[in-house]
Image: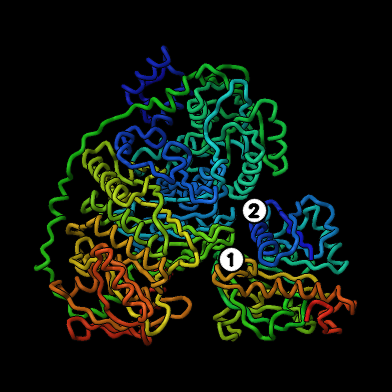
């Protein structure tokens, strides 16, 4: 019998232990307890989040695979499917930033090619404390190098992403990695093992002691002791994974593979039990056959290791030699370690001795599920009241604009994405720096637009609205590139769900995301939940990151956010209104995180439909989402074209808003566009048809940004000066 | 002109080079496995970019021992065209087929971005479709592209016209500011003394189609094709400039 202290340390509570005893009809041994502990952790079993995740709309005409597999898949036409998923690697990155981030990239890429898809693009969403802090600079540098080190080597372009800085992430940075893959729709592989007698093969890197209990590590808060859990962080080898990609895709193409699952969290335990459970099968494995990196590993260690770059696959009986030959060619291990059975039991032998015997479904599917209490946190009432009349008026708008452009949340991320190979595979048609990256689908004339988005400050103030805005902004970015939003993958980063206040944030955010997805008709096809993002008892802002895929019917109609030529008219398309709540301006200038961000999803939907039609009709020269820093920042960013910057002159009226709100407010549902003035009438007609207001505010011209507000000039600044402030701010902070 | 693109373990621009030769240039092309002991039958061999053998030990240091490299050297000695791009360039220097070495970027960071290259002269197999001094917009993506050669080697290369591309500003000015990685004399691409083996750190295959924001890289591939046609034209001359200069030779 196992001491309570032992299973509690592994993350199981007394009731869960009793449940295991009941399932097995006996006390589990040490190895078995370890297996249940990882599989029933929140990271693998979603025991707290599962009931809430049911709220997501997950179906749609394009959906070929919804949540529940290694990744989701949507039909993108011509018999092709895009497979995509986002996943967190927060805790490993907090203690070992390079390897944490690198293996986060490796893990998500594995999820994609496990589905039979060739990985075609990586994205990420990163959150850190402020760069003034030395440890944050260390984490930032390590994470960026880790993503570059892995992604560049493996040859998957990192095409887009976002980085935010806020004190709330200082002790617990977020590293979310997303990957897209391309596969023929009828060749999607699944992690399901069936056919008693079929051989079970272990392929890829050897097993070591790294990453033992990584999944459990992900399911507790970070503390001083986290440093001591460095062994729970895996070490990546992108070269081996590159070989594994090629060998796996080649092996899948033979048709001899019945089922395939990567070994990520919970390693062999997860892959054996999940594959068996999904195929209504059992499995017998002899772990002495598992290729090892070190001697003397116990059964417990082998079953729990999270060594990277490994896969488990089930081949058709009699075809194991052909499969092995392919992995041999690529210089990779491929060993038959067992076979499928039909009794639903996973039996693990170590040199012939039975060391674990567990019903597959009891680990993989019958995870205990908890309906948690939810309570509105005390802070909410306080932060939501923002008395704008009490805010001091700002006189010098020029300084504010420069300050905002230098803010690390707004400033150019060029010094980061230049470290990522974002062009390999020769599909990148819109380079990083615009609203969304655009990839061509070779040979089709069509394209994909992809982005990640979440403003967690809005989510902190109101997780429901913040969740909805994250979806709206991601969709808006995709639309600004000329693509129609098609599918969402989400990475839900929150604090400890056992706290009712955190669980409330979580549920609210999921409800908000769900409503927005329903309104826009965009299904959630995959995702990941990351709880326990707390350090020293304080949670991060709720951060539900949205990864959005859009489909572009004609890639020649793609659009970027940059002004193209002098003389073009500049138009603010959409719904102007108050927007100081939760704004970057409010934080940067007034030191406040307060207010109630709002969004009207129906208006947003009309705006996006209008903008998309305008782009598809060839009316627009540029389109840029108005987001952090408001209209003034959007104007400046649109001027910073890498093909040659432009100036702009605009005349605005405050229309009842405070002047700072008119310039820096972040009211939702606005897109800044530019177009040849001869097309203005067509745009006006189109907008009227969609019941979307617009304001013609100025002209692309010269080399300065000039703004007249209510008839008086409030800004007249050289673009070169603004651009160098914006481009250089992060590099300066790191120097 | 029949091309072979070599796949080393860890190559990751192999498919991109294949795509450009096949889809953009419309030439026959095969992949060649690193274990092959012959490259007979190919007129042009491409060593693609990537991280052969993970770039472990040193870039290109392990790949140069691949069985196929013996065959590549033989093909080069026989006058076949050999092109190393990025990691391929690194492998060619490690193999001693091109002079000099590629060290870590001065910034010690990987850099991926579009930049400009000045074509030094158009009398080579790799630049004959360019005008002298032409500026090409082509991207780089590497961590070890900092070219170095001893002064006497460099002088010899200058003398023989072996320097083909230098990093420059948009107007063609070769300046320190335009140098992305610390390369000696802004060198971005070179060829051997015989003029049939070329290495360059920038990626012409990533900039051979308008949709990728630049098609300037095509000049390199077009030059290679032109050179091949000239070599095989009736004049029979194995040099860069066709002496016949008639429509018959299929070049002019």
Residue A370 position, x and y percent, is 29, 30
Image height check: is A111 above or below A662? Answer: above
Chain ID at mark 2: B
Residue A180 position, x and y percent, is 50, 51
Q: Which of label 1 and label 2 is nearer to you?
A: 1
Asked which secondary structure carries label 2, the reply is helix
Residue situated furthest top in the rendering: A25
Q: Residue at image x 28%, y 74%?
A: A632
**Residue carrying label 1:** B141
Q: Is label 1 on the same chain as label 2?
A: yes
Asked which secondary structure carries label 1, the reply is strand
In screen coordinates, is B159 left or right of A158? right
Chain ID at mark 1: B
Residue B193 appears in the rendering? no
Asked whether B154 or B178 is in front, the reply is: B178
**Residue carrying label 2:** B54
Q: Residues within 10 Å of mark 1 (few under 14, many from 20)?
A: many
Marks 1/2 in contact by CB < 8 Å: the verdict is: no
Asked whether A541 or A563 is in front, the reply is: A563
């Amino acid at each position: 019998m196992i001491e309570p202290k032992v299973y509690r340390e592994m993350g199981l509570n007394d009731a869960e232990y009793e449940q295991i005893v009941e399932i097995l009809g006996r006390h589990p041994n040490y190895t078995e307890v370890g297996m249940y502990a990882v599989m029933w952790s929140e990271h693998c079993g979603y025991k707290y989040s599962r009931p809430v995740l049911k709220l997501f709309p997950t179906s749609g005409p394009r959906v070929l695979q919804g949540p529940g597999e290694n990744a989701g898949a949507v039909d993108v036409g011509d018999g092709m499917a895009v497979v995509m998923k986002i996943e967190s690697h927060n805790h490993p990155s907090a203690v070992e930033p390079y390897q944490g981030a690198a293996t986060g990239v490796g893990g998500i890429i594995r999820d994609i090619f496990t589905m039979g898809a060739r990985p075609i693009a990586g994205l990420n969403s990163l959150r850190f404390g402020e760069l003034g802090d030395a440890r944050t600079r260390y984490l930032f540098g390590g994470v960026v190098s880790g993503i570059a080190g892995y992604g560049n080597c493996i040859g998957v372009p990192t095409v887009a992403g976002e980085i935010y800085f806020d004190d709330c992430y200082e002790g617990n940075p977020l590293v979310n990695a997303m990957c897209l893959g391309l596969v023929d729709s009828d060749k999607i592989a699944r992690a399901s093992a069936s056919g008693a007698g079929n051989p079970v093969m272990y392929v890829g890197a050897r097993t070591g002691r790294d990453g033992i209990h990584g999944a459990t590590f992900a399911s507790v808060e970070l503390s001083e002791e986290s440093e001591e859990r460095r062994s729970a962080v895996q070490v990546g080898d992108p070269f081996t994974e590159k070989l594994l990609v090629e060998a796996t895709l080649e092996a899948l193409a033979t048709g001899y593979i019945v089922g395939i699952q990567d070994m990520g969290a919970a390693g062999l335990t997860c892959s054996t039990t999940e594959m068996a459970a999904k195929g209504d099968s059992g499995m017998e494995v002899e772990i002495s056959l598992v290729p090892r990196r070190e001697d003397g590993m116990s059964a417990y260690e082998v079953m729990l290791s999270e060594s990277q770059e490994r896969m488990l696959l089930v081949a058709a009986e009699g075809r194991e030699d052909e499969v092995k030959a392919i992995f041999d060619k690529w210089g990779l291990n491929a060993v038959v370690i067992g076979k499928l059975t039909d009794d639903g039991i996973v039996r693990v032998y170590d040199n012939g001795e039975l060391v674990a015997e567990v019903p597959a479904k009891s680990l993989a599917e019958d995870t205990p599920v908890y309906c948690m209490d939810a309570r509105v946190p005390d802070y909410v009432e306080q932060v939501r009241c923002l008395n704008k009349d009490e805010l001091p008026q700002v006189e010098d708008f020029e300084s504010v604009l420069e300050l905002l452009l230098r803010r690390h949340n707004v400033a150019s991320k060029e010094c980061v994405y230049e470290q990522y190979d974002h062009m390999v595979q020769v599909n990148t048609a819109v380079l990083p720096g615009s609203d969304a990256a655009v990839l061509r689908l070779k040979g089709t004339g069509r394209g994909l637009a992809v982005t990640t988005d979440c403003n967690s400050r809005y989510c902190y103030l109101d997780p429901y609205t913040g969740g909805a805005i994250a979806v709206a902004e991601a969709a808006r970015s995709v639309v600004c590139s000329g693509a129609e939003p098609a599918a969402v993958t989400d990475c839900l980063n929150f604090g400890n769900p056992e706290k009712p206040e955190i669980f409330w944030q979580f549920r609210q955010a999921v409800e908000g995301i769900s409503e927005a997805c329903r309104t826009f008709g965009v299904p959630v096809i995959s995702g990941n939940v990351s709880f326990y993002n707390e350090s020293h008892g304080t949670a991060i802002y709720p951060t539900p990151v949205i990864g959005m895929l859009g489909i572009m019917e004609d890639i020649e109609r793609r659009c970027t956010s940059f002004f193209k030529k002098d003389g073009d008219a500049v138009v603010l398309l959409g719904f102007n209104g108050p927007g100081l709540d939760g704004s970057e301006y409010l934080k940067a200038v007034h030191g406040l995180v307060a207010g109630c961000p709002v969004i009207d999803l129906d208006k947003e939907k009309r705006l996006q439909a209008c903008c998309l039609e305008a782009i598809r009709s060839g009316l627009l020269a540029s389109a840029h989402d108005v987001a952090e820093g408001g209209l003034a920042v959007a104007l400046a960013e649109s001027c910073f074209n890498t093909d040659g910057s432009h100036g702009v002159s605009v005349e605005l009226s405050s229309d009842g808003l405070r002047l700072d709100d008119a310039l820096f407010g972040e009211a939702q549902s606005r897109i800044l566009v530019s177009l040849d003035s001869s097309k203005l009438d067509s745009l006006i007609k189109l907008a009227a048809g969609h019941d979307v207001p617009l304001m013609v505010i100025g002209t692309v011209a010269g080399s300065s940004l000039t703004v007249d507000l209510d008839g008086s000039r409030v800004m007249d600044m050289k673009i070169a000066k603004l651009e160098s402030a914006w481009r250089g701010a992060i590099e300066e902070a790191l120097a | 002109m029949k091309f072979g693109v070599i796949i080393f373990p860890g190559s990751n621009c192999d498919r991109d080079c294949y795509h450009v030769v096949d889809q953009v240039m419309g030439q026959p092309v095969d992949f060649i496995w690193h274990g092959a002991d012959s490259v007979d039958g190919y007129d042009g061999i491409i060593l693609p970019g990537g991280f052969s053998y993970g770039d472990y030990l040193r870039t290109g240091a392990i790949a140069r021992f691949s069985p196929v490299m013996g065959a590549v050297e033989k093909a080069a000695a026989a006058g076949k065209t050999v092109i190393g791009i990025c990691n391929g360039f690194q492998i060619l220097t490690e193999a001693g087929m091109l002079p000099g070495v590629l060290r870590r970027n001065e910034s010690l960071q990987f850099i991926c971005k579009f930049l400009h290259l000045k074509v030094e002269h158009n009398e080579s197999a790799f630049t004959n479709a360019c005008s002298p001094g032409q500026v090409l917009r082509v991207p780089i993506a590497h961590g070890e592209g900092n070219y170095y050669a001893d002064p006497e080697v460099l002088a010899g290369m200058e003398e023989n016209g072996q320097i083909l591309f230098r990093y420059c500003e948009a107007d063609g000015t070769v300046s320190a500011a335009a140098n992305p990685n610390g390369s000696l004399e802004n060198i971005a691409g070179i060829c051997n003394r015989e003029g049939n083996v070329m290495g360059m750190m920038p990626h012409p295959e990533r900039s051979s189609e308008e949709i990728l924001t630049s098609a300037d890289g095509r000049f390199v591939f077009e030059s290679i094709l032109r050179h091949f046609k000239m070599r095989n034209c009736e004049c029979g001359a194995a040099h860069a400039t066709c002496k016949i200069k008639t429509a018959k030779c299929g070049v002019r």
